[in-house]
Amino acid sequence: MKQIALGSRAKGFTLVELMISMVIGLVVVGAILVSVIGSRDAGRFQAAYAQMNEDAQIGLSILSRDLQMAGYALPTALVPDPGGATSSLTSATLAPGAFVFGCDTGFADPNAGVLACGVATTSAFMVSYEANKDNTVLTTTAPIRPSDCLGNGIAVGPPYVANNRYYISQSAAAGGRPELYCASGALNQPLVENVDDMKIWYGLSVPAAPRQVVRYVTAADIALNGTGPGGAGEWANVVSVRVCLVVRSAEPVLKGGDEGTLTYLDCNSATQTSNDKYLRRAYFTTASLRIKMPI
């Protein structure tokens, strides 16, 4: 039998080569894990931003639409005239001519007949206008009436006057989740979830230019001709309103043992740090009162 001679004996891997191979394998696996975890975290952040953008868009749309209607009245119904006895708004909580009113520290009782400022850290404001079939959704059951911010029929009228109060509160039913609320009459209910903060600035005009904004101020900066909230003063000179909502994610974006803090810019463009693992972002819009705009 013919034998085949081997020039050298077959050799296996040395211990060093095996260790090098294991290290390379671990590096590859680690890189894959980092990529997977990064993709998961990025997806969680993207979903949170999408939810926040949607909540902010809904909230700002509701507020902007109502603010644009402030002071609206049909010619034969209520008239924004301080001396007009037929003006339904003269019987509201504010002095004649003031169809927008707000507090930098929220309302003490948003359902009160006469509004007073509270001690909250978020702003609140009220909007009044004549509601009709063209600017509200009519109720579907008799008697057919225009609706308020809660979708309920306005009981007194005609003319029907919407008196909507917007503020931030925590919902006990939602486990203390902050929400944008509206109050009308004796009722209130949340409109948009996950709204942490609201800040309002009011654009004021001057007699020489009654339809032009000359400066934006907070509610505390507006001079009141009267005692306490409700004096007309410069409220009658408000021609536009700038709104900021700070919206947070519905769920924490940092999970389990994830460490670190999240930062964001608040309504005053100041950097804030949150340690509760929720993502936050400030959103802005400006609404002009249509009755004050140039014709």
Image: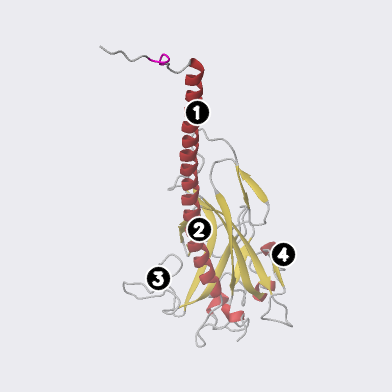
Which class describes the residues within 10 Å of circle 2: few (<14), some (14-19), or many (20+)? some
Q: Which mark is residue 209?
A: none
Per the image, label 3 sits on a secondary structure element best described as loop
**Which residue is at the far right?**
208
Q: Which residue, given by chain and number where applicable, does mark 1 sit on?
A: 24
Give the number of the mark in front: 1 or 2. 1
Residue 218 position in % (x across, y down): 68, 63
Give the number of the mark in front: 4 or 3. 4
Q: Amino acid at mark 1?
A: Ile
* Rendered position, 175 above or below 94: above
Is 74 or 158 nearer to us in this picture? Answer: 74
Q: What separation in Å lies between label 4 and label 1 (alpha carbons)?
A: 66 Å
Q: Which residue, given by chain and number where applicable, does mark 2 sit on?
A: 53
> Which of the marked residues, 4 or 3, is nearer the chain's N terminus?
3
Q: Residue at x 55, y 70 (%)?
A: 127
Instruction: Judge whether residue 193 can be spotted in this image.
Output: no
Q: What separation in Å lies between label 2 and label 4 (alpha carbons)?
A: 31 Å
Q: Residue at x 46, y 42 (%)?
A: 40
Q: Amino acid at mark 3?
A: Gly
- Provide the residue span drawn in magenta: 6-10
> Which of the marked residues, 4 or 1, is nearer the chain's N terminus?
1
Q: Which mark is residue 221?
A: 4
Contact (Cβ within 8 Å) of mark 2 with mark 3: no
Is residue 8 magenta-colored? Answer: yes
Contact (Cβ within 8 Å) of mark 2 with mark 4: no
Q: What separation in Å lies between label 4 and label 3 (alpha carbons)?
A: 35 Å
Per the image, label 4 sits on a secondary structure element best described as helix
Contact (Cβ within 8 Å) of mark 4 with mark 3: no
Total numbered labels placed on residues in the image: 4
Give the number of the mark in front: 2 or 3. 2
**Which residue is at the far left?**
1
Per the image, label 2 sits on a secondary structure element best described as helix
